[in-house]
Image (tube, rainbow, N blue to C red):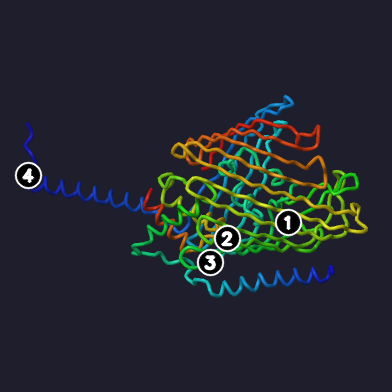
Amino acid sequence: MAASPPAGQQIETLRIAVDRANQTANSARRSADEWRNTRAVTHLAGYAAAGYASQDNGADSFDVANFNPIFHFQYADRVLWESELEVEVEEDGSTGVALEYSAINIFVNDYLTFGAGKFVSPIGNFRQNIHPAWINKLPSAPPGFGHDGAAPLAEVGFQLRGGLPIGDRSKVTYTGYVGNGPKLEGEDGELHGVDTDGFTGDPDDEKVVGGRLTLLPVPSLEIGVSGAFGDAAVVENDGLDFEGDPARDYEVLGADFSYRWHTLDLRGEYVQQDIGDAAGSIVPEGGKWETWYLQGAYQFAEAKWEGVLRYTDFDSPHPDQTQEQWSVGLNYLLTPNAILKLGYEFNDGLAGEETDEDRWLLQVAYGY
Amino acid sequence: MKRTNSSARRCAVVGLALALTGAAAAADPAGTAAPAGNDPSQFARGAQTWAATCARCHNMRDPKELRDDQWRAVVAHMRVRANLTGQEARDVLAFLQESN
């Protein structure tokens, strides 16, 4: 049996072991603090949805499979660059990819943020804040809040925005922007639609200036007004690129509100896009796209279930786009950000058009 | 009439630029807003703002869903989208980071 080392040697060995343990612990602590204390942060957020639609005319399909990753790149309390992609499966099986927005935001001070790039249109509330699938309480957007609708979708330009407290409970918020504005599409000698996806070109050479102002007399009530003014020009006619059409007036007006009382959520919004006439244009006559909706939602059973009712009235210069809709929904909240939605739409549009077909909608949405 | 509209829009563009320039001159030169530090009411203010502001648009997410650093980016995103003041954003962030 080997003799034990002398006591002094044992103590020295023990001291070395303790030193190494301390070094390891300090290293682990530094590593843990690194991600807490870095000035720059990179983060992936976003949302995804899958859905099924069944129309009364017999057409039914799994019609939604998309995800929208949102990339956040932040430096301290000064800069945030955020970009959102919209990735979706098209009807023909191809994958559609679009840049929903990509903008740098500079926090100038506590009350002012400067933004530049492509951003979601600040007009109204639905496009800015409600349209993501995990936030929208029904499986579909209200008619008139999509492509070729009444509400602008996005803009490329600069924006200033922020909020100012008024006393302890009240607040005003503001957003002002300048951008290239929309492009117009002609078809069969008529104005077919207003394309507001956000463009880096400006064929009419006049910028659109607009914004939104909100008042929150109490934190649970928000009342907003929006407007934008500028020029637009026809750049596509009968599906072909078209150049040289004269500029014409472009005007947007909107108003919105939202109110929350316990688990009752009420909101509504009105918005119109008005295109002026233009003598000498390939499409001389202008048009007005106008929509509004009112929505009520109530969560019950410990906020695991939610009932929704929405009415929308969308008017377009084209009868095949015009639509009146009642929509009812029942949601089950798997988690606060993962929602199973069942909806039924009573649609009243031009006979024979899809806008006239009632339909069931089933959707699961997840915000991450 | 068209010329008047164009002039008004140009004035608006210049106004926005001037507003930005003035605001930038008044900005925090350090580039980072000072944390509230030992402000004992920050947690309560953050909880109140979180409950009142976030629920106005979407369901309340669990603070435990994300880490401290992830909440930084999410709150910065919401500062832009919801037009939060810098103080509101710092209060909400403190609440979320202490609650996760």
Tag 2, which secondary structure? strand
Residue hosting label 2: A105
Return the disc, 3 or 4, that comes first in the chain's sequence.
Answer: 4
Q: CA distance from mark 3 to mark 4?
A: 74 Å
Residue hosting label 3: A164
Q: CA distance from mark 4 to mark 2?
A: 67 Å
Assign the N terminus of chain B to one quadrant of the image: bottom right
Quarter-wise, where is residue A340 in the image? top right
Residue drawn at (70%, 29%) of the image: A55
Return the disc, 3 or 2, that comes first in the chain's sequence.
Answer: 2
Q: Nearer the viewer, residue A358 or A211?
A: A358
Please give left or right for residue A2 compared with residue A319 in the image: left
Residue hosting label 4: A6
Residue A35 can be seen in this image = no
Return the disc, 4 or 2, that comes first in the chain's sequence.
Answer: 4
Residue drawn at (51%, 66%) of the image: A165
Q: Is residue A122 above or below residue B25?
A: above
Closest to the camera, between mark 4 and mark 2, is 2
Residue hosting label 1: A200
Quarter-wise, where is residue A302 in the image? top left
Return the disc, 1 or 4, that comes first in the chain's sequence.
Answer: 4
Amino acid type for the residue under numbered disc 2: Asn
